[in-house]
Image (tube, coloured by chain):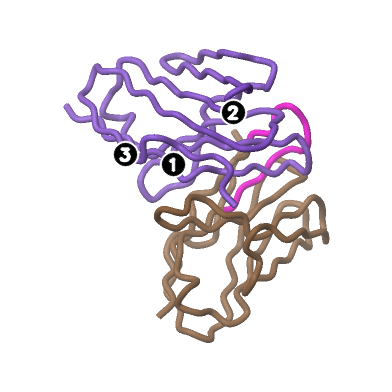
Amino acid sequence: DVKVTQSSRYLVKRTGEKVFLECVQDMDHENMFWYRQDPGLGLRLIYFSYDVKMKEKGDIPEGYSVSREKKERFSLILESASTNQTSMYLCASTLGEGLYNEQFFGPGTRLTVL
Amino acid sequence: SQQGEEDPQALSIQEGENATMNCSYKTSINNLQWYRQNSGRGLVHLILIRSNEREKHSGRLRVTLDTSKKSSSLLITASRAADTASYFCATDPGTASKLTFGTGTRLQVTL
């Protein structure tokens, strides 16, 4: 079974702190994604990566950056956390482009910024 | 932007009844997928239907796709309390491996 793990289930940070959210997948997937999920807005794509050291902006990249130094690990960074970044963050991975582009999700990190 | 829009936003049924959720989208797709999310957890892939398919079954799930109307429906037959979750459709344009998710339907199945 594909496993996608996220470093924390719950996280509480203060405004202005630098926050790291880690995601690791164990199936040698090419593509990895970071989403945030807010009530009434569904999932919105923040950043994604096709390969090591490659990154692409999603729909809402402002206030975030990412790092992919190894194929299995994709990190989301909040350089200076703000209260409007309080949300559920979901990481996902997928093998690659093709007909069976099923995404595998981690359990999510619920981040609260005070 | 959210391409997929699910309808209804919330649905409450009794165990044993069928649940139908609809998804509409705006641009052409390579395939459409349905995911389930239990409260406070990650999403789990349920079923994928390609743009050249009209209907697909998987256990108690039945998905239809009408590309002329840019819509899809998910039917869960003989629902169980364990089916209580949020259900999302996601559209795949066939490029860049990106999916666009809808806002979801919250299904509540009561005993």
Query: Could you classify mark 3 by the number of other residues whose Cα lies within 10 Å: few (under 14), some (14-19), or many (20 or more)?
Result: some
Decide if residue B38 is on the left or right side of residue B16. Answer: right
Q: Between marks 1 and 3, how big is the CA–CA gap?
A: 8 Å
Q: Which residue is mark 1?
A: B104
Q: Which chain is purple?
A: B
Q: Residues within 10 Å of mark 2 (few under 14, many from 20)?
A: some
Q: Say whether disc 1 or disc 2 marks the residue closer to the N-terminus.
A: 2
- Letter of the chain in brown: A
Height in image: B64 above or below B7?
Answer: above
Please state which amino acid type lies under the numbered disc 3: Ala
Q: Is residue A61 above or below residue A52?
A: below
* 3 and 2 marks on the same chain: yes
Asked whether the residues under marks 1 and 3 belong to the same chain, the reply is yes
Query: What segment carries the magenta color?
Result: A91-102
Which mark sits nearer the N-terminus, 3 or 2? 3
| Residue A51 in the image, given as x and y percentages of width and height | 82, 52
For label 2, the SS is loop
Kindly identify which chain the residue marked by label 2 belongs to. Answer: B
- Which subunit holds the residue at mark 3? B
Residue under pointer 2: B70
Look at 56% across and 13% down and name the residue there.
B55
Q: Secondary structure at mark 3?
A: strand
**Whole-number angstrom distance, CA of label 1 to CA of label 2:** 17 Å
